[in-house]
Image (cartoon, helix red, strand yellow):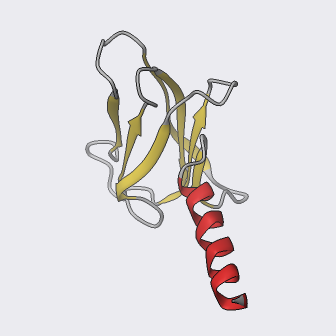
């Protein structure tokens, strides 16, 4: 019984982390710089779930592309009715990153995405 209860608690904790409103990947340390920042808003389409894809690519012509060290997807909707963010490709210690943003059913979203690296 104890193992079932502890497994259930761990499962619920992981589920809460996955469905958190704001997400962050990696760790920001001294020497990191802001590579790209964007605010993405989607409130207009009359569809049940709205999605958008944010993509960070290194600058064209750079001799050495910076490695991504930290990604922050901040939900700007304060009442808990914002959307969800998921890292779908690239990411930490890569030179690119792709984040998919999704809304809650029949609502919009407003995210600020910040990508840091060195």
Position of residue 49 measured from the top left corner of the image (x, y, whole percent): 34, 29
Q: Is residue 5 left or right of residue 62?
A: right
Q: 107 or 54, which is in the foreground?
A: 107
Q: 72 or 29, which is in the foreground?
A: 72
Q: Is residue 45 above or below residue 112?
A: above
Q: How many marks?
A: 0
- At x 46%, y 20%, the residue is 107
- At x 33%, y 42%, the residue is 59
Residue 31 placement: quadrant: bottom right
Pick the quarter of the image with the N terminus.
bottom right
- At x 39%, y 63%, the residue is 94
| Residue 60 visible (yes or no) | yes
Q: Is residue 112 left or right of residue 45?
A: right
The outermost residue toward the front is 1
Q: Is residue 49 above or below residue 100?
A: above
Q: Is residue 37 above or below residue 7?
A: above
Position of residue 35 measured from the top left corner of the image (x, y, whole percent): 50, 42
Residue 51 placement: quadrant: top left
- At x 59%, y 65%, the residue is 14
Q: 93 or 20, which is in the foreground?
A: 20
Q: Is residue 5 left or right of residue 94?
A: right
Q: Is residue 50 above or below residue 46?
A: below
| Residue 118 visible (yes or no) | no
Pick the quarter of the image with the C terminus.
bottom right
Position of residue 68 measured from the top left corner of the image (x, y, whole percent): 48, 57
Residue 46 placement: quadrant: top left
Position of residue 22 measured from the top left corner of the image (x, y, whole percent): 61, 42
């Amino acid at each position: 019984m104890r193992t079932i209860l502890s497994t259930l608690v761990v499962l619920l904790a992981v589920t809460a982390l996955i469905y958190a409103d704001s997400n962050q990947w990696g760790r920001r340390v001294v020497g990191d710089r802001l590579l790209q920042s964007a605010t993405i808003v989607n409130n207009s389409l009359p569809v049940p779930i709205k999605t958008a894809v944010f993509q960070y690519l290194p600058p064209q012509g750079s001799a050495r592309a910076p490695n991504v060290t930290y990604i922050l997807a901040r939900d700007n909707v304060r009442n808990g009715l914002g959307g969800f963010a998921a890292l779908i490709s690239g990411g930490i210690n890569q030179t690119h990153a792709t984040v998919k943003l999704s809304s809650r059913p029949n609502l919009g979203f407003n995210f600020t995405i910040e990508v840091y690296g060195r």
